[in-house]
Image (tube, rainbow, N blue to C red):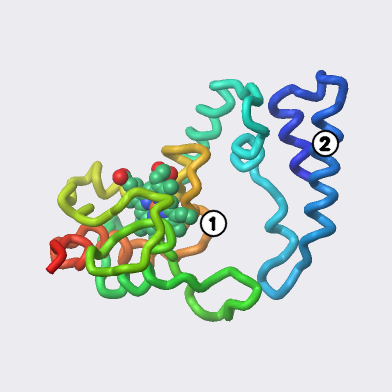
Amino acid sequence: MRLAGVARIVGLSLVAGSWTSAAEDIAAVLESSFMAKNQATMARLQQDAVQEVCSAPRGTPVEETVLSELRQQRLDAVVLPADGVFLGDWQRGAEVAGNGRGLQSSDDPTKPNGGNCYACHQLAPDEVAYGNLGPSLTGYGARGQSEPMLRYTWTKLWDTHAYNLCSHMPRFGAQGILSEQQLRDVMAYLLDPASPVNQTKQ
Ligand code: HEC
């Protein structure tokens, strides 16, 4: 189980094996408490290299070079839109942002996934229900549509780990949660001056 990898990465196996065995115990408990159901398979317990590092216990020393290498790997893996078109249709983007379905055992895998942006962000100012784990994105379009801005926003949505290694935001492109077209539409929802995100509250 990959949690044991945390101990290897941070070199704690030297500490009398105590953390290694704790990590193995935790992995065994997790493995026995989860079950595979429909599209929610046991693969969700497999941590990738970033998750291993980011879920190391607080205070665990992690080499800065390990972090910057991982960040660079994530940045290098970002796929920009093939045709150079970053912006789609904000109306379809609004649906993606407000849709919290997808990838759970109870969801229909033949339907497109949502982005669930409102779970963590304020976007359109007249929407009353939103989470605040992430910053408010109301008025995001004021940043304009320069090439660096388009690339920044696309990259953030494609793989948030490329900028903030231990970010809590889903990796919409890298994990195949949203399609390229859905990403374009969400980009327009954020950046189009006509989008509700960029209107002031009535
Ligand atoms: C589980 C929570 C969560 C979800 C869901 C989520 N985000 Fe985020 N997002 C965050 C957090 C936390 C940050 C700030 C910290 C960071 O950079 O990771 C953030 C940062 C951002 C930023 C950068 C903000 C800035 O000021 O530059 C953008 C843009 C963004 N999110 C867009 C979206 C969009 C669009 C969606 C839906 C497709 C979405 N997020 C879904 C948690 C989330």
**Screen quadrant of the C terminus:** bottom left
Q: Tell me the crowding category of disc 2: few under 14, some 14 to 19, or many 20 or more residues within 10 angstroms, Cα based.
A: some
Helix, strand or loop at label 2? It is helix
Q: Quadrant of residue 132?
A: bottom left
| Residue 6 drawn above or below residue 43 | above
Residue 77 drawn at (x, y percent): 48, 44
- Indicate which label's residue lies in the foreground, 1 or 2: 2
| Residue at x 43%, y 65% (from the top left corner) | 115
Task: Say if disc 2 is inside 8 Å of ligand 1.
Answer: no
User: What residue is drawn where x is 85% and y is 27%?
Assistant: 18
Q: CA distance from mark 1 to mark 2?
A: 29 Å
| Picture coordinates of residue 193, whole percent (x, y) | 14, 61
Q: Which residue is mark 2?
A: 22
Q: Is residue 117 left or right of residue 36?
A: left
Q: Under 8 Å from ligand 1: the CB of mark 1?
A: no
Looking at the image, which residue is at 26% across and 74% down?
Answer: 91
- Name the residue: 75% across, 30% down: 7
Q: Which residue is mark 1?
A: 175
Q: Quick check: 74 above or below 66?
A: below
Residue 82 shows up from this direction: no
- Residue 24's label in the rendered image is none
Instruction: Name which of mark 1 and mark 2 comes first in the sequence.
Output: 2
Q: Nearer the viewer, residue 146 or 55?
A: 55
Q: Is residue 67 left or right of residue 145?
A: right
Residue type marked 2: Ala
